[in-house]
Image (spheres, rainbow, N blue to C red):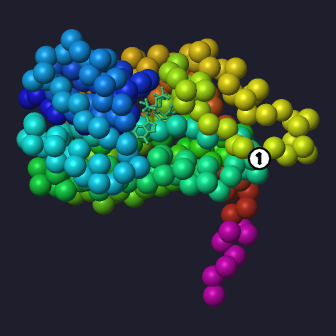
Amino acid sequence: MTRIWFVTGATRGMGTAIVKAALDQGDKVVATGRNIARLRKLFANVPTDLIEFLELDVTSEPQAQSAVSEAVKCFGRIDVLVNNAGYCLLGRFEEATAQQIEAQFATNLFGMANVLRAVLPVMRRQASGRIFNTSSIAGVKAVANATFYSASKYAVEGMTLALADEVAPLGIQVTAIEPGFFRTEFLSDRSAKYGQSHIDDYVPYGNARALLATADGQQQGDPAKLAKVIVQVANLDKQPRQLLIGNDAIDFVMPSLEKRIVETHEFASLTQSTDF
Ligand SMILES: NC(=O)c1ccc[n+]([C@@H]2O[C@H](COP(=O)([O-])OP(=O)(O)OC[C@H]3O[C@@H](n4cnc5c(N)ncnc54)[C@H](OP(=O)(O)O)[C@@H]3O)[C@@H](O)[C@H]2O)c1
């Protein structure tokens, strides 16, 4: 059966790759993004009955609602939602302004929630659906110098896992995908933002630009291969609830997961000392 995909942030990076991978396996796609002219140019060679382009800045709930109703008008259903749109605010806790923190959550968490609120009623009516919420390895192991990016992706994990339990009985499967470092524009100045406050005390310890921007263009992950993984998972009878993607991902998060278990055992007697 041909499935209908709805992808956010399809103008660049992983979003573009996911649209291509879904089309490659014979599915149809609603490609959404803030720059519709760019979407049309990117996918100019795709037959028009296989793809629909819709403007969607995920921070706008009205736009999310109208994009989803347009998508249903066009293709009749939405089988797979990929909540991909996002960016990173880099820098230490104290370097980020309140406005920058709010903007980070407005896109990575509340934007994702806007799209979910619009799509879930469609999937409930269908009694089926697949959802991929893009988290990060930074949503499993917090990354210093990417404090509020990590915080936003931890929030994505919490929302995704709770939602997965809520909608499983309704035939909807939800996965948090946790990519490692992938070679997109993510760490470039076209996407990444940096905390605006400068604090002298941190100067001897380096800064986010020096620590992270150097990785731009060197990331080992291929977004086309990530996209193929997502297509494969969407074809499984049972999706995982959380999925690390990328050769670097397991090495990156495993020590912190193991440390958590060790610490849990180490402090168990204190933890369990609070009953009446
Ligand atoms: N690349 C990595 O190493 C990596 C690792 C872990 C997780 N991720 C996650 O993967 C997702 C995709 O990132 P990427 O690597 O493909 O980065 P990218 O190359 O910078 O692309 C980001 C995409 O998100 C879109 N976007 C940002 N804010 C948006 C908004 N408010 N509304 C709609 N679209 C918006 C951008 O649209 P415009 O073209 O309009 O700016 C662009 O299409 C993000 O959620 C990111 O956090 C990436």
Residue 177 part of the magenta segment: no
**Residue at x 54%, y 30% (from the top left corner):** 191
Farthest residue in the front direction?
37
Residue 272 part of the magenta segment: yes
For the residue with label 1, is its CB less than 8 Å from the closest atom of ligand 1?
no
How many numbered circles are shown? Answer: 1
Visible residue check, residue 233:
no
In which quadrant of the rendered view does residue 3 lie?
top left
Give the residue at mark 1: 197
Vertically, is 167 above or below 19?
Answer: below
Which stretch did the figure color magenta? Answer: 269-276
Q: Is residue 2 left or right of residue 21?
A: left
Residue 64 percent coordinates (x, y): 29, 49
Q: Is residue 228 left or right of residue 65?
A: right
Residue 67 percent coordinates (x, y): 23, 44
Residue 234 percent coordinates (x, y): 26, 33
Visible residue check, residue 103:
yes
Q: In the structure shown, which secondary structural element does the residue marked by tag 1 occupy?
A: loop
In which quadrant of the rendered view does residue 275 lie?
bottom right
Q: Give, as a three-letter code, the residue at label 1.
A: Ser
Farthest residue in the top direction?
45
Farthest residue in the bottom direction?
276
Residue 244 percent coordinates (x, y): 48, 33
Give whichever of 192, 184 is nearer the camera: 192
